[in-house]
Amino acid sequence: MESYIKIALKLIFLCTILWSTCMLNVVLSIKLSNFLFKLPIKDVVSYNVMISGFASHGHGEVALKLFSEMLERGIQPDRITFLGILYACSQIGCLELCQYYFNYDYGIERSVDHYACMVEIFWLSRIY
């Protein structure tokens, strides 16, 4: 019986560490996004950081809004931006939007990563 209590206590301890780490990630990403939004000069690099960050943390809609803002400001996307957008579409499960962005000509040569993202979204749309 004592070993079960030790195992339970270890699990509680590990869950607490995991939860604390997740909360730290959330706080740091919010602080980083606030810092980047306040930058006087927004270029393709700062947008790439924001788009990729929001997409990889499950906020695909925000990433797509940032992409629209980037295009409105006349900033030309690069292959990193394009990958972040495809990943954002993949995260929100929007196959049609992902296909639209993939087929639109931004003057970016498609790489293996771009095609891999498309394979993922097709795979996920087949499962769900």
Image: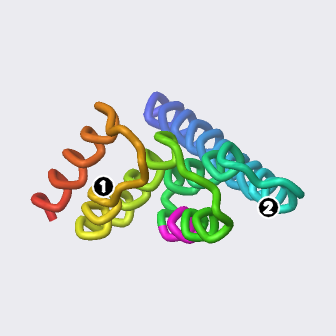
Q: Do the residues labelled 1 and 2 touch (CB within 8 Å)?
A: no
- Disc 1 residue type (three-letter): Phe
Instruction: From the image, tell me which residue sits under label 2.
Output: 37
Instruction: Name the side, left or right, on which 71 lies relative to 109.
Output: right
Instruction: From the image, tell me which residue sits under label 1.
Output: 102
Secondary element at image label 2: helix
Q: Residue at x 76, y 49 (%)?
A: 28
Residue 104: quarter of image: bottom left
- Residue farthest left in this picture: 126
Image colouring? rainbow
- Disc 2 residue type (three-letter): Phe
Residue 64 percent coordinates (x, y) = 50, 66
Give whichever of 37, 24 is nearer the camera: 37
Q: Residues within 10 Å of mark 1 (few under 14, many from 20)?
A: many
Residue 118 higher or lower than 90, as above or below: above
- The stretch of residues the image draws in magenta is 61-65
Residue 23 percent coordinates (x, y) = 68, 52
Mark found first going from the N terminus, 1 or 2:
2
Mark identifier at residue 62: none
